[in-house]
Amino acid sequence: MLSVAEALARVLNDFQPLSSEFVSVENVVGRVLAESISSTLDLPPFVNSSMDGYAVRADDVRAASTRAPISLRVIGDIPAGTNPTLVIEKGNAARIMTGAKLPRGADAVVPVEATDNAQAAIGGVTPDHVSIFESVQAGAYIRSIGEDVRAGDIIFKAGTITRPYDVGALAALGVRRVSVVRRPRVAIFSTGDELVSVDQTPGPGQIRDINTHALSALIKKYGGESLMLGILRDDVNVVHRALMEAVTQKADVIISSAGVSVGAYDVVKSAVERDGSLNFWKVKMRPGKPFAYGKVRGVPFFGLPGNPVSAIVGFEIFVRPALLKLGGYARVEKPILNVVVNETLHSDGRETYLRAIVTRDGEHYAARSAGGQGSNIVSALTRANALLIIPADVTEVKAGERLKAWMLDWSEDAYL
């Protein structure tokens, strides 16, 4: 039986980033750049004022102070968005708005707060003279050409996950369409005669389908798009038709839940092997030992267990990094903390993933169980923010000892 590390290595060896597609800059947030983006211009493209104030020659106001203000003749106004033609010569100044282009002859700006015209605004009456109460150095309160970005600079590298803040930078560069890695299309279905849809009332011996919805949410979280194939009966022909439907609809990945263990009605394994093969179908882990991986007509297939917690844990360990790799993400690892456990924990010797609540305890992190650890107990997973990992062949961890914790609720930027 494969270890978790061995199984994961086999899975990831089969995955490479998908092809690219173009999206508008308005739709780029959360997408992975397929190509680096370089600036074609300097930002700012011209020297401009960073304050409302007066464009001056620094030499003219070098001795200015509140006790000995310097008076300059005002020769005009410079609103933002204009190309000034006036020239600042010795003893002159021009009233200027934030962002307006600095006129020739000026090498600094005096903020309006340091003048006797602090309440004036462009559009009002232009004063004949202005008194300056503060000396400034050349370059004060101005933005130089290329201060932010130089033409030719690489602004975003391929593999960058774009954020809302990045959209403004792209707009400033005039980028309207962006090349991004295509989102993986993931076909998903659940098997089991006992399952009914979420909008149905279960009859005797029936339960609502949890896995399809939970797994679809995880697919979306990790950058994929779900192709929902529904709930299937425990019939090898029905399952086989669903697999072929996934192939026909050009799914990049196929996921099933249930039907891959050794029960008499576990038919998924047989259906896969009609038009594909399984690389492995058991992993030395808990929960989630009956986990299958293979291909159906060249499309990667993940067979997850039917118990909800087992399915979700299996997804996090194996499917999540595969989807991230397909989606072009540079990092696929979960964030890991070293934590002190607050209670004695037990395992059966398989690599074990326990639902836990991790909190900061002074300079350290502490962890406690989130509740019952049965593979059907979803409530413990809803309370958990981490999975505690008990290594293989360890059967007991005493209170006060340390374990590694996979953080489930952590800044995505920390690892994607």
Image (spheres, helix red, strand yellow):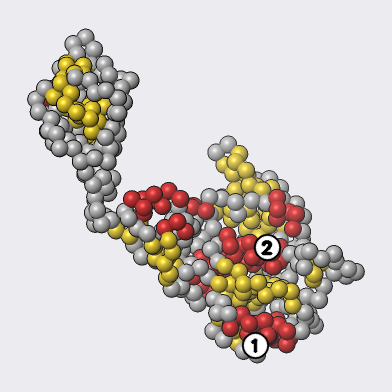
Asked whether residue 286 appears in the rendered view, the answer is: no
Q: Is residue 325 above or below residue 383?
A: below
Q: Position of residue 148 (x, y in %)?
A: 28, 45
Q: Residues within 10 Å of mark 2 (few under 14, many from 20)?
A: some
Confirm or deny contact between disc 1 and disc 2 (CB under 8 A): no
Q: Residue at x 27, y 23 (%)?
A: 125
Q: Amino acid at mark 2?
A: Ala
The residue identified by callout 2 is: 214
Q: Which one is earlier in the sequence, the residue at label 1 or at label 2?
A: 2
Drawn side of residue 116 relative to residue 1, left or right: left
- Circle 1 or circle 2, nearest the eye: 2
> Residue placed farthest to the top in the image?
67
Q: Position of residue 122 (x, y in %)?
A: 29, 28
Q: Residue at x 85, y 64 (%)?
A: 201
Which of 339/396 is in front? 339
Q: Amino acid at mark 1?
A: Glu
Asked whether residue 376 appears in the rendered view, the answer is: yes
Q: Secondary structure at mark 2?
A: helix
The residue identified by callout 1 is: 273
Which of 124/207 is in front? 124
> Residue placed farthest to the left in the image?
90
Q: Secondary structure at mark 1?
A: loop
Drawn side of residue 21 relative to residue 305, left or right: left
Q: Position of residue 144 (x, y in %)?
A: 22, 40
> Residue placed farthest to the bottom in the image?
274
Disc 1 to disc 2, how far (Cα)?
26 Å
Q: Position of residue 83 (x, y in %)?
A: 20, 41
Q: Specify the quadrant of the image occupied by residue 185.
A: bottom right
Drawn side of residue 92 relative to residue 46, left or right: left
Drawn side of residue 12 relative to residue 188, left or right: left
